[in-house]
Amino acid sequence: MDNVTLLEDTRQMLPQLIELRRALHRIPEVGNDLPETRAAVLEALEGLPLTIHLHETTSGIAAVLEGGRPGPTIVLRGDMDGLAMPEDTGLDFGSEHDGRMHACGHDLHTSMLVGAARLLSARKDDLAGKVLFMFQPGEEGHYGARFMLEEGLLDQVDPSPTRAFAIHVTSLYEAGTLYLKPGPYMAAADKVTITVHGQGGHASAPWNAVDPVPVAAEIIMAAEVALTRTVDVFDPAVLTFGQMAAGTAYNVIPATATLTGTTRTVSEERRDQIHAMIEQVSAGIGAAHGVTVDVAIERGYPVTINDDEVAAEVSALAAGLLGDDRVNQAPTPIMGAEDWSYVLQKVPGVMVFLGACPVDLEPGKAPVNHSNLVRFDEDAMAAGVALHTAVALDFLA
Ligand SMILES: [Zn+2]
Ligand SMILES: [Zn+2]
């Protein structure tokens, strides 16, 4: 099957996909329980020759397409969840769910995957193997992919997938352009909570109390300095304290002070080193002032690592499909995190970024993913659908 036909079929389908995307955009749901979204996706898949497994621990949907001949399995993913935030885009299909918004483009991902399911269903006789369409909830920090894996996602199809592919849209890049890189592409994101235990007292007599506030301030400064002095810049790390909390009144020395932050790393080695550094610095600063300091680290999503060979194959395939000038090597990893990483730990594959900056805005200046103002170019979905389809056709040739 040639690229011209595939692109034409995709373009023909685009109006339906835009309609679906807008319907989803109106009803953003957050977390792992997405009943309205799941119902809309199931309706959109109706009539297709798919075996559907409805997940029970989450609203995940695993839909399997069996090709005309035996062969391996590829998993294609679309995440379905929105964010807990208000939408201020003024779009006429804006969110109807107060305080929730599809601000990360997952409504486009879901629609693109539905599009790919339709195109691949129409070509099922050409497929030597199976396609597992993974519609996942809870990407935005709720471990939706991990829950689906724990519920046996990869065993719900026989043979188990040996190739994995996912697309993420971004308003950072020009619509229809593609970015990817081999190796680590997105960071591990962990949460750090540091509690400094002092002794409360009167603000006028700190010598009769143990003030935790300056100790907490010193820990922030010392940890940031230690980071710049101990981290190899070619295997980077980010440490940001987004929250500091202490005290209830201006004239009271509080008993405790708490810092909450996040670390971002793109190797497991660096991840462990940074955690150890934070513990060491916190304990050391605490000891210097005679207070105890507790450090709690919650490990979040691991590093998203693209398979080198698959990245090269997908790059070449995408260049043939979309044009050489549309496919770019990403110069660096992105310090955001993705739970697609859990799938890539088990199945060789990649995640790629698809530019979807609105044509009336300038890439790099447009509101970004997670902004209350972010908009996406819907026509860019055509490239995404074609790519999902081409990657599956190629793997199952
Ligand atoms: Zn997001
Ligand atoms: Zn996202």
Image: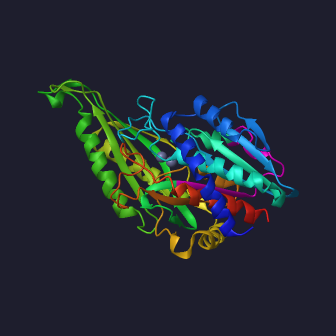
Front one among 25 and 266: 25
Measured as percent of width and height from the top left, residue 126 is found at 82, 61
Measured as percent of width and height from the top left, residue 261 is found at 38, 43
Front one among 270 and 6: 6
**Direction from residue 203 to residue 37 in the image, left or right:** right
Region of the chain picked out in magenta, as a range = 149-168
Front one among 62 and 184: 62
What colour scheme has been applied to the protein in the rendered image? rainbow
From what the image shows, is residue 32 above or below residue 226? above
**Direction from residue 389 to residue 369 in the image, left or right:** left
Q: Can residue 339 be seen here?
A: no
The quadrant holding residue 313 is bottom right
Task: Tell me if residue 154 is in the magenta stretch.
Answer: yes
Q: Residue at x 29, y 45 (%)?
A: 288
Q: Residue furthest right?
A: 69
Which quadrant is home to the N terminus? bottom right
Measured as percent of width and height from the top left, residue 158 is found at 84, 49
Which quadrant is home to the C terminus? bottom right
Q: Residue at x 74, y 62 (%)?
A: 393
Q: Can residue 174 be seen here?
A: yes
**Direction from residue 39 to residue 290 in the image, left or right:** left
From what the image shows, is residue 82 above or below residue 13? above
Front one among 80 and 351: 80
Q: How many numbered marks appear? A: 0
Measured as percent of width and height from the top left, residue 316 is found at 63, 73
Q: Residue at x 75, y 47 (%)?
A: 154
Task: Tell me if residue 375 is in the magenta stretch.
Answer: no
The quadrant holding residue 307 is bottom right
Q: Residue at x 42, y 28 (%)?
A: 98
Q: Residue furthest left?
A: 204
